[in-house]
Image (cartoon, grey):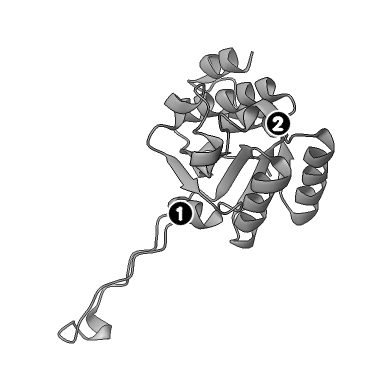
Amino acid sequence: MLLDAEESQLVLVDYQSRLLPAIHEADLVVANAQRLARIAQLLQVPVWATEENPEGLGGTVEALQPLVAGRVLPKMAFDGTSVLLPRLKPAPRQQGGNARSLPKHLQKAAPAPAPGREMIVLAGCEAHVCLMQTALGLLEEELEVWVVTDACSSRSERNRDAAFDRLAGAGAELVTTEMVAFEWLRDAGHPRFKEVLSIVK
């Protein structure tokens, strides 16, 4: 199964100014997160970001701020599912009615809810804490989770790699930034192909 841009959302987990200096290969990780967000914007894929305890860990790093403006969700729990879920998977609208409504046989059937964007492309820090717990939480909510490995890290490689092993075992798809870009495009004839290619390179 391939990613579909029209069914995807991108979530950037805790790329925060006071956390990143301790993260293994932080510059590369942030650069890949920036690439993902720029490509998502070009292809009209919604982008969200979380911030863990922003008073303690600072806000989202400057390189990502313009790409997530107005879509940053603060949290205290390591698992960001509770703050993300209302945005990623809104509850279907209930059909209204009252005692004076038409009899059921005369009522029109409620329209089916619009299909959601249930492919969640996830990247962030720390891979073995907030990223992993959020991914597992979203999997429990029956969303498809795709973890972008070259845009994730922890303070140590060992913790990062242990998180990837556990996530793969739990059913998350492990991908890279370029995999996401080219699966979202699907075709060299895509009208945004050259722009995306320039970001990837």
Amino acid under label 1?
A: Pro
Q: Which is closer to the viewer, label 1 or label 2?
A: 2
The residue that disc 2 covers is: 176
Residue 71 seen from this side: yes
* Image position, residue 99 (x, y; %): 18, 87
* Image position, residue 173 (x, y; %): 72, 45
Which element carries disc 1, helix, strand or loop?
loop
Q: Look at the image and tell me in which quarter the C terminus lies.
A: top right
The residue that disc 1 covers is: 115
Which residue is farthest front?
56
The reply to whether callout 1 and callout 2 are in contact (CB within 8 Å) is: no
Calculate the distance from the C-alpha at mark 1 to the C-alpha at mark 2: 26 Å
Q: Look at the image and tell me in which quarter the N terminus lies.
A: top right
Left or right placement of residue 47 versus residue 93 in this view: right
- Label 1 crowd bin: few (<14), some (14–19), many (20+), radius 10 Å: few
Residue 22 vertical placement versus 145 (above, below) = above
Quadrant in which residue 56 is drawn: top right
Counting residues from the start of the chain, the first of labels 1 and 2 encountered is: 1
User: Which residue: 45% across, 32% down?
Assistant: 68
Residue 166 vertical placement versus 125 (above, below) = below
User: Which residue: 67% across, 55% down?
Assistant: 136
Residue 84 vertical placement versus 140 (above, below) = above
- Label 2 crowd bin: few (<14), some (14–19), many (20+), radius 10 Å: some
* Image position, residue 28 (x, y; %): 68, 21
